[in-house]
Image (cartoon, grey):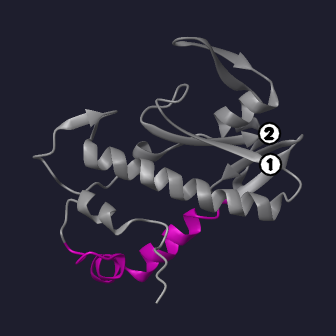
Amino acid sequence: MKSFQGNISKESLNLFASDIGSGEFFSYVGNLVSLEQAISVIGLLSPDFIELDGHVFWLPNAKQYDPKKFPLKGLVETEAGVLEQSSSRKDVERYRNIFSINQFFSKWEEAPSRPMFKVGLAEEDYRLCHLFAKQIAKYWSDALSDCFPDKVFQFETADDLLDEYGVCLTFWQL
């Protein structure tokens, strides 16, 4: 028999505040996640993208794109802690495509006994944010390849990226 594990280690369940899961994801999701919630998560794996003057950006809803609220300006760190505006495509995309993982979630499992580790999170939540970012990068990379087969994208996960707080994910064209 050959066995092939999924993309997310079952060991990551040990990071969950709840112990409902019995060592696999299907029981956890089946007990705690509604169908609407599951479909919404799948929707996160393939957001809308727009291409504007050679720049590529993700949006929650491309139909609501407003160019006045989306200037082609980015930020770049010129030295430690010093940010300057930039109009280079890489800097604009890297800045405009930031997805702050821990700021995105408004609901967290209650675990008052967990001490703060980094960026306002307990170590378990911090590791889960990085795991989430890694999976989002995988799916968004596939979605970008489908939409822009001739373009190559670089993904980055970092803490406190440019002017955003917490665990952040971003991408830009190479």
**Magenta segment includes 23:** yes
- In the rendered picture of this protein, how many numbered marks are placed on residues? 2
Can residue 54 be spotted in the picture? yes
Q: Residue furthest front?
A: 1
Q: Earlier in the sequence, mark 1 or mark 2?
A: 1
Provide residue 171's location: percent of width, then percent of height: 67, 42
> Could you tell me the amino acid type at mark 2?
Leu
Mark 1, secondary structure of its residue: loop
31 to the left or right of 167: left
Q: Which residue is mark 1?
A: 152
**Magenta segment includes 87:** no
* Res 78 quadrant in image: top right
Q: Magenta span covers which residues? A: 20-47
Residue appearing at x 66%, y 23% in the figure: 75
136 to the left or right of 25: right
Residue appearing at x 39%, y 65% in the figure: 9
Q: Residue furthest left?
A: 113
Residue appearing at x 80%, y 48% in the figure: 152
4 and 59: which one is in front?
4
**Pointers 1 and 2 in contact (CB under 8 A)?**
yes
**Label 1 crowd bin: few (<14), some (14–19), many (20+), radius 10 Å:** few
Q: Residue furthest bottom?
A: 1
Instruction: Calculate the distance from the C-alpha at mark 1 to the C-alpha at mark 2.
Output: 6 Å
* Res 148 quadrant in image: bottom right
Q: Which residue is mark 2?
A: 174
91 to the left or right of 122: right
Provide residue 126's location: percent of width, then percent of height: 34, 44
Mark 2, secondary structure of its residue: loop
**Label 2 crowd bin: few (<14), some (14–19), many (20+), radius 10 Å:** few
> Could you tell me the amino acid type at mark 1?
Val
Specify the quadrant that holds the C terminus.
top right
174 and 88: which one is in front?
174
